[in-house]
Image (cartoon, grey):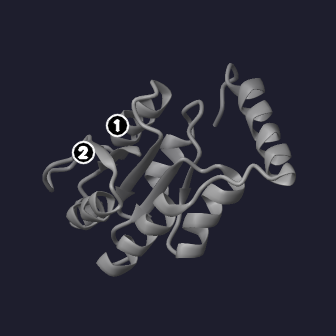
């Protein structure tokens, strides 16, 4: 699996842990930074990951910031990106299986290294089931996205 990875300065402390978990899962990682604790704006990091998904250069993404919320909000503004904050393994795999989530966001100020690795394993090990009820709901999400893509959102 080709994976786009990004973090801001607040997510940097989990960077190596998450990258190691991705490597252990056999992913080819597009590492989009940040590469230090120097402050960077989380929307820029989310955009970089989202653009790789939109261009087909990655099939999934992982974003880290302090809470996981900021990168999730920013990433979800992008067409075709379905990001969710997950701080438990159930949500990390269920979001993929039922909701076709393609970006995992994690808060480095919320979870520690062991849980972060577990979240990555759960996310990367999951597959969208495409069961009728899930596919029906996902189609409705795509319809919403298409209808609203040209509108101004708050």
Residue found at the far front of this picture: 26
| Occupied quadrant, residue 4 | top left
Looking at the image, is 45 positioned above or below residue 56?
below
- Give the residue drawn at x 48%, y 56%: 104
- Give the residue drawn at x 50%, y 68%: 122
Residue 40 disc label: 2
Pick the front one: 22 or 87: 22
What is the quadrant of the C terminus in the image?
A: top right
- Give the residue drawn at x 71%, y 57%: 98
User: Which element type, helix, strand or loop, lies under badge 1?
Assistant: helix
Q: Residues within 10 Å of mark 2 (few under 14, many from 20)?
A: some
- Give the residue drawn at x 30%, y 76%: 113
Q: Is residue 68 visible?
A: no
Place of residue 144 in the rendered image (x, y in percent of width and height, measured from the top left):
78, 34
* CB-based contact (under 8 Å), mark 1 and mark 2: yes
User: Which element type, helix, strand or loop, lies under badge 2?
Assistant: loop
Q: Residues within 10 Å of mark 1 (few under 14, many from 20)?
A: some
Residue 44 disc label: 1
Looking at the image, is 114 positioned above or below residue 138?
below
| Occupied quadrant, residue 3 | top left
Is 1 displayed left or right of 87 in the figure? left
Is 132 displayed left or right of 22 in the figure? right
Between the C-alphas of marks 1 and 2, the distance is 8 Å
Looking at the image, is 78 positioned above or below residue 87?
above
Looking at the image, is 140 positioned above or below residue 100?
above
Place of residue 72 in the rendered image (x, y in percent of width and height, measured from the top left):
50, 51
Place of residue 116 in the rendered image (x, y in percent of width and height, measured from the top left):
37, 72
Q: Is residue 71 visible?
A: yes
Place of residue 50 in the rendered image (x, y in percent of width and height, measured from the top left):
45, 35
């Amino acid at each position: 699996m080709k994976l786009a990875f990004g973090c801001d300065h607040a997510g940097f402390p989990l960077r190596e842990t998450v990258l190691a978990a991705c490597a252990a899962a056999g992913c080819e990682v597009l590492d989009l930074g940040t590469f230090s604790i120097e402050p960077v704006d989380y929307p820029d990091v989310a955009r970089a990951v989202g653009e790789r998904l939109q261009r087909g250069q990655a099939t999934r993404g992982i974003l880290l910031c302090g809470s996981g919320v900021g990168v999730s909000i920013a990433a979800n503004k992008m067409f075709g990106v379905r990001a969710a904050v997950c701080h438990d393994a159930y949500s990390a795999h269920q979001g993929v299986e039922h909701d076709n989530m393609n970006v995992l966001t994690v808060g480095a100020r919320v979870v520690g290294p062991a849980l972060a690795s577990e979240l990555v394993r759960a996310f990367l090990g999951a597959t969208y089931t495409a069961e009728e009820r899930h596919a029906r709901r996902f189609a409705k999400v795509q319809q919403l996205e298409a209808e609203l893509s040209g509108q101004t959102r708050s």
